[in-house]
Image (cartoon, rainbow, N blue to C red):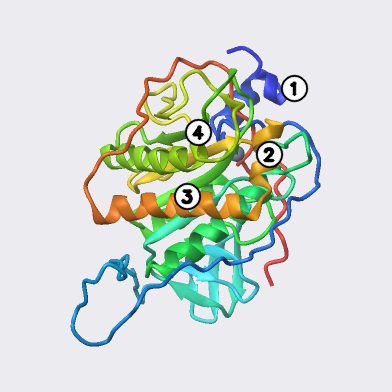
Amino acid sequence: MRRAPGVRGVPAVRAAAIALLLVAGCSSNGGTKQAVSTTTSSSTTSSTTTTTAEPVTTSSTIVPLPAMRSDAAHVLATPKGFILPIEGGAPGAWKVMTPCGSTAIVHGGDTIGAATVVLDPGHGGDETGAVGPGGTVERDLNFAVARRVKADLEREGATVVLTRTGDYRETLATRAEIAQKLKPPVFISIHHNGGNDLVRDRPGTETFFQVHSPASRRLAGLLYDEEYRYFRSLPNTTWFADRDAGAKYRPGQNGGDYYGILRLTNGVTAALSEALYITNPKEEALLVQANVQEGEAQAITRAVRRFMLGDDQGTGYTTPYPRTEPAGPGGGTNGCVDPPLE
Ligand SMILES: [Zn+2]
């Protein structure tokens, strides 16, 4: 195996090991720590009328998403706000898997036993993900959008859990373990792209599904359909893209999924969203806007609604060209330092 260009100076064998942990196609070059604004102006547009009496089916009433609840102690929302898989212990002193994938005892907190949707804001801490020419850091943008999706879905009745609740490193193993513990009907890893093949006149939105899961394929196609349609409506004419942009998959060497977050969530319906390229100055200029972040979040929310409440297929399905280049490194335990959990 050739040395991976994304992991310069790393011996080929270890590079291969790192490659197996890859988060996503977004490049993680550039060490800028400058953060994008994560102001969360919640533009509430919900006009849902909830009634306590007979069911109402007026056009102003939307069908709520199911709220998944359980008294089981699968995941801990710690007093400091971390979401961590419970591996043992007892109420008051849970043994948890830490963001870096080791174990610790955490006191207090609230247990979570189920979720309708688990959202995974990609990267975190010194794993920045892609960085835009204007300094927009993918790590922060992913988080800002994920928080908006959470708020939007919760307004529609869903119970939503984020795998990452602040700016810290977190292994793919810990993120996936949260999904494996909660077994949500929907898991979405939220990313923004870098490393395009070409420039074209329409958005290069990409969504990835799990190779062997028809449900994941449908989820990715619905995400593509809603995201692409929204971005296409924006005033921009120059978009970055790969020549096989669309809803697709990337097989690993053993026939499973190349991307760790889709592989490790096996058994849970998961998709990975690479909404736009923050490495394109034109797209970056859109993505820093709160209304565009909210537009993206609402597109994802609509996709979740269609996935859960309907049976239609998505759009944009494409056959990916074979790739040999590794995605950006990251997601492993190497160099990972846990934040103070208490
Ligand atoms: Zn990414």
How far separated are the C-alphas under marks 4 and 2? 14 Å
Q: Quadrant of the N terminus?
A: top right
Mark earlier in primary sequence (3, 2): 3
Residue occupying the point 61% across, 70% down: 81
First reached walking from the N terminus: tag 1 or tag 4? 1
Q: Dot 2, crowdedness within 10 Å: few (<14), some or many (≥20)?
A: many
Q: Mark 2 and ligand 1: say if the CB distance to the nearest ligand atom is below 8 Å.
A: no
Which quarter of the figure has residue 153? bottom left
Q: Judge depth for marks 2 and 1 and give the one in front.
A: 2
Residue that appears at 60% across and 70% down: 105
Q: Is mark 3 within 8 Å of ligand 1?
A: no
Classify mark 3: residues with Cα within 10 Å, few (<14), some (14-19) or many (20+): many
Label 4 CB sits under 8 Å from any ligand 1 atom: no
Q: Residue furthest bottom?
A: 53
The dot on residue 8 is 1
For the residue pair 142 and 330, the one nearer the viewer reads as 142
User: From where the camera sits, is residue 72 visible?
Assistant: yes
Quadrant for residue 340, please give it. bottom right
Q: Identify which residue is drawn at 59% across, 18% down.
A: 197
Name the residue carrying label 3: 176
Residue 67's place in the image compared with 331, above or below, is below
Residue 308 picture location, percent across and down: 28, 55
Residue 128 placement (x, y as % from top left): 71, 42
Residue receiving disc 2: 284
Secondary structure of residue under mark 1: loop
Instruction: Compute the Cα span from label 1 to label 3.
Output: 27 Å
Q: Amino acid at mark 2?
A: Glu
Instruction: State the separation of the CA atoms marked 4 and 3.
Output: 24 Å
Q: Above or below — where is 151 with respect to 206?
A: below
Q: Are marks 4 and 3 in contact (CB under 8 Å)?
A: no
| Amino acid type, residue under disc 4 in the picture | Thr
Q: Which residue is tagged 4? A: 205
